Image: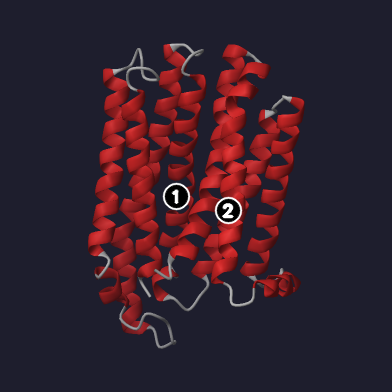
């Protein structure tokens, strides 16, 4: 299981960014309904979760480095190295997130604009991360599919993690309409993230087939189609679980539309867990093709 550090690093950091973005979105909705102070109290654990995920992801990133201290040397090549850019924006994003989380817990006041800016910094970091893998000698990563996988995970995983914590925090003092809007917001984002990634798979396979016949450069794996097909079971399981999770979440909104955070809470949490497991399987499928 040599892929664990890479899976943990990439997925945790991407989830952290997604959680931060959804913290800003949900806070914006809650602030209008219950005021800044109560909305801040409700969303503080969500923001803290985003910071913890980011820090754990950063810690995991050191596990796949032969010499972690060499990361500092990479900073000298920001003009030409995606690794340097990724390290710098990761440091800026996590530094800003952790510092602002501390400020929110001390002052008890949250600002949606600051959260949105931190989330934007996180998106830039994930773009640099995807570009780092895209610009390698791994043929299976040298396609726009890498960007779809990473950005899609950012929104899908971030949405369900933020939704799960928010549901527990606000179920007692938000109206049914707002609760339904929170779930539908996450559902729409997850649906788009999963659908776009599934839609790009045919062109991804077609591209690999075309590149194999024309590419003379040394890339890995040497038989990418075979390597890709060997992960069929893992990928299909991930896609099926994603679809199941989306259907369950949609059903919870339809059946418990007036009590989605009370009677329908278990189904919302179960569907979120299924979608999150699917993201983990998808990430393993991404890194195991070597």
Q: Picture coordinates of residue 124 (x, y %)?
A: 62, 52
214 or 198: which is nearer to us? Answer: 198
Residue position marked by numbered label 1 in the rendering: 153
Q: Residue at x 43, y 14 (%)?
A: 177
- Residue 214 sits in quarter: bottom left
Q: Picture coordinates of residue 227 (x, y %)?
A: 29, 74
Q: Residue at x 62, y 52 (%)?
A: 55
Task: Estimate how packed mark 1 is, as few (under 14), some (14 to 19) or many (20 or more) residues with alpha carbons within 10 Å.
Answer: many
Scheme of image coloration:
secondary structure
Mark closest to the chain's N terminus, 1 or 2 = 2
Q: Is residue 170 above or below residue 129?
A: above
Task: Estimate how packed mark 2 is, as few (under 14), some (14 to 19) or many (20 or more) residues with alpha carbons within 10 Å.
Answer: some
Q: Secondary structure at mark 2?
A: helix
9 or 205: which is nearer to us? Answer: 9
Q: Picture coordinates of residue 75 (x, y %)?
A: 73, 69
Tally of numbered discs:
2
Q: Picture coordinates of residue 198 (x, y %)?
A: 31, 52
Residue position marked by numbered label 2 in the rendering: 56
Q: Quadrant of the N terminus?
A: bottom left
Q: Residue at x 57, y 19 (%)?
A: 30
Q: Is residue 202 above or below residue 217?
A: above
Horizontal side of residue 37 vs 15, given as left or right: right
Q: Secondary structure at mark 1?
A: helix
- Residue 269 sits in quarter: top left
Quote the CA–CA distance across marks 1 and 2. Answer: 17 Å
Q: Quadrant of the C terminus?
A: bottom left
202 or 276: which is nearer to us? Answer: 276
Q: Is residue 278 above or below residue 41?
A: below
């Amino acid at each position: 299981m040599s892929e664990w550090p890479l899976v943990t690093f990439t997925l945790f950091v991407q989830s952290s960014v997604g959680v931060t973005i959804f913290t800003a979105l949900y806070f914006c909705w809650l602030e209008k309904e219950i005021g800044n102070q109560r909305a801040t109290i409700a969303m503080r654990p969500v923001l803290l979760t985003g910071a913890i995920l980011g820090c754990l992801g950063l810690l995991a990133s050191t596990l796949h480095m032969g010499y972690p201290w060499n990361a500092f040397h990479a900073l000298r090549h920001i003009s030409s190295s995606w690794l340097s850019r990724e390290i710098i924006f990761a440091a800026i994003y996590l530094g800003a997130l952790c510092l602002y989380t501390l400020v929110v817990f001390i002052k008890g006041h949250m600002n949606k604009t600051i959260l949105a800016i931190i989330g934007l910094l996180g998106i830039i970091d994930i773009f640099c991360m995807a570009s780092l893998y895209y610009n390698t000698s791994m043929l299976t990563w040298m396609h726009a599919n890498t960007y779809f996988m990473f950005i899609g995970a950012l929104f899908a995983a971030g949405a369900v993690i933020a939704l799960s914590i928010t549901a527990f925090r606000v179920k007692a003092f938000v109206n049914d309409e707002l609760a339904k809007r929170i779930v539908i917001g996450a559902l729409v984002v997850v649906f788009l993230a999963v659908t776009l990634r599934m839609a790009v798979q045919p062109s991804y396979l077609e591209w690999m087939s075309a590149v194999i016949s024309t590419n003379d450069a040394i890339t890995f794996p040497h038989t990418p189609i075979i390597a890709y097909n060997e992960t069929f079971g893992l990928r299909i399981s991930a896609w099926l679980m994603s679809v199941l999770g989306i259907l369950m979440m949609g059903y919870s909104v339809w059946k418990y539309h007036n009590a989605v955070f009370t009677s329908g809470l278990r189904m919302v949490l179960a569907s979120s867990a299924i979608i999150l497991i699917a993201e983990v399987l998808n990430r393993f499928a991404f890194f195991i093709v070597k």
